[in-house]
Image: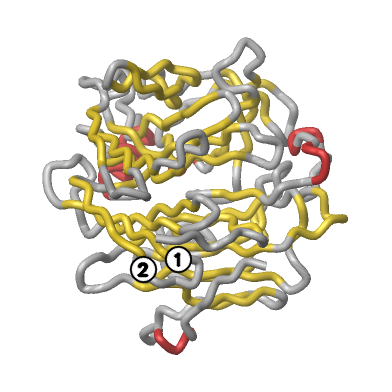
Amino acid sequence: MNQGKLARRLMSALGGLAIASIPLAAQGSGSAPVAEPGYTISVFATGTASYSKPDSATTDGHFVFIGYQNNAASDGTSGSSTIVQYRMNGSVVRSYVVQGKNDGLRINPLTGKLWAVRNEDGNAKLSIINPRTGAQTEYAFPEPAPHGGGYDDLAFTRSGAFVSASAPNPDSAGKFTQPAVDRIEIHNGAIVLTPILMGNATAINRTSGQQEQLNLSDPDALAIDAAGGLVLTSQADAESVFIRNPGTNQQQVSVLHTVTQTDETAWMPQRGGEDQGEQSGDHGNSGRRVQGQFLITDASANATYLLNKSGGFSAGWAYTEAPADSSTLAGTVGVLDQHTGAITPVAHVVSPHAILWLPAGQNEGGD
């Protein structure tokens, strides 16, 4: 969470994958990550003199794409970001420069193109990049944004594409009543947004089963859970909002209060697609193992890591990150209990940002 987000939070409170890795010795003293027993962690890539501060990450199944923010301003007033395309062995294919601060970074599964959202605090822009040709198309988000801020993360689901409306302004009563998540579409060369979740929406508490009203002060990361639903992290609020059938007449909203602030969360697939929300407090479908590994970016260490687990990961489990400014568990990567909000640490880094699940069996593509 940047200083602008922290200021708004205080104001509200007052009102088989073939991936090679670099030995950890390549890291400077004091920044080497530590894995808990049963897990191992290694370096996938590091920043350079040309690009630094890795944040978002995504994959098309053949390549990994990492967005480096390079100290760009979060409102787009200065600086640029570098998106680096890597082979699965960590070698660089090419890089793309986008103006402003890149945060959301996702592959559109229908077109194979890379969507990069910039400027989470205002003057938001979208770059759509063709990884095969390097061609970029630029779009500006509608201004002024109804919530007063910018746009942050993206997610592509069976129900369409969605974007989080970040850095909202509270009303005179200190409430956040504007859109928190929008459907995003491109029509006639322009971005069209349709709100699907308001900051003061009603949700079912996943722990108590009781209904409550949200007050989302910090809509941030978006993810897809093991059942295919959309999940929004409201970082400063320490809440994960689960949206089943987003943007449809069958939309259902539930909220999980986590033990501390979290940033991104990633899920492994589970057998049969059963809904995580129907399970009774366990981490997931622990009877089945899934092979693969997690990719984790660490902005402060200027490095991206690979996290492996002996014997594979349990199907349906969710892994999350507590960022460097979390009230507790700062710099922790851990298993998220999707019923209680507890986090069991599995690794410790300096400043985790993206966490990306890389299933075994993906193939390295050509240039």
Count of picture labels: 2
Colour logic: secondary structure
Evaluate if marks 2 and 1 touch, with contact meaning CB atoms under 8 Å apart.
Answer: yes
Q: Which residue is situated farthest in the left direction here?
A: 78
Say which residue appears at 36% left-offset and 85% top-offset: 28
Q: Tag on residue 196?
A: none
On screen, 274 above or below 29? above
Q: Residue at x 60, y 45 (%)?
A: 258
Front one among 97 and 333: 97
Give coordinates of residue 60: x percent, y percent. 50, 50
Dividing the picture into quadrants, the one containing residue 185 is top left
* Place of residue 37 in the rendered image (x, y in percent of width and height, measured from the top left): 70, 78
> Do we see residue 120 in this rendering?
no
Q: Which residue lies at the image location 76% right of the left edge and 52% below the top edge?
A: 315
The residue wearing badge 2 is: 92
Instruction: Point out the tag, 2 or 1, that comes first from the N-terminus.
Output: 1
Q: Residue at x 58, y 61 (%)?
A: 363
Is residue 159 visible from the viewing direction of this image?
yes
Amino acid type, label 2: Val
Residue 276: image location, x then y, percent? 75, 38
Q: Please give the label number shown on residue 87.
A: 1
Task: Name the secondary structure under disc 1.
Answer: loop
Taking the image as shown, residue 237 lies to the left or right of residue 175, namely: right
Mark 1 residue crowding within 10 angstroms, few (<14) / some (14–19) / many (20+): many
Number of residues whose C-alpha sits closer than 10 Å to that of mark 2, classed few (under 14), some (14–19) or many (20 or more)? some
Q: Horizontal and vertical percent for residue 300?
A: 34, 68
Estimate the spatial distance between the alpha carbons at disc 2 and disc 1, rounded to whole Å. Answer: 6 Å
* For residue 328, side relative to residue 281 (left or right): left
Three-letter residue code for mark 1: Arg
Q: Quadrant of the C terminus?
A: bottom left
